[in-house]
Image (spheres, rainbow, N blue to C red):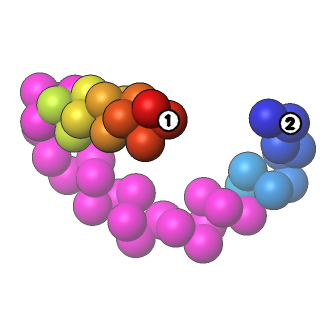
Amino acid sequence: MDINADKLIEELIDNWAELATFFKYSADLRRIIYTANVIEGLHCQL
């Protein structure tokens, strides 16, 4: 996947509220959420 910096910045700005909420969680909880999302993604590919 090739994404340019301008598009990345635009996506960050557009989704900042959701991203900022994610970072309010503790590092341990964020790790669990991230891991769960990766596993969920793998299941979708099966």
Q: Residues within 10 Å of mark 2 (few under 14, many from 20)?
A: few
Residue at image location 86% in from the left, 36% down from the top: 2
Report the span colored magenta.
10-31
Q: Of tags 1 and 2, which is closer to the observer?
A: 1
Compared to residue 15, the image places residue 23 above or below, namely above
Precedes in sequence: disc 1 or disc 2: 2
In the image, residue 6 lies in the stretch drawn in magenta: no
- Asked if the residues shown at circle 1 and circle 2 are in contact, with their CB atoms under 8 angstroms apart, the answer is no
| Residue receiving disc 2 | 2
Relative to 38, residue 23 above or below: below
Report which quarter residue 17 is drawn in.
Answer: bottom left
For the point 81% across and 56% down, the residue is: 7
Q: In which quarter of the image is the C terminus?
A: top left
Where does the image place residue 16, in percent across and percent down from the top left?
48, 65
Q: Is residue 31 left or right of residue 29?
A: right
The answer to whether one can see residue 32 in this image is yes
**Residue at the spot x=37%, y=66% of the render?**
18
| SS assignment at label 2 | loop
Residue 15: image location, x then y, percent: 52, 67
- Measure the C-alpha gap from mark 1 to mark 2: 20 Å
Magenta stretch, main secondary structure class: helix
* Left or right: 15 as drawn, with respect to 23: right
Q: Is residue 6 above or below residue 16?
A: above
In this figure, which residue is indicated by the disc labeled 1? 45
The quadrant holding residue 5 is top right
- Tell me the kind of residue under disc 1: Gln
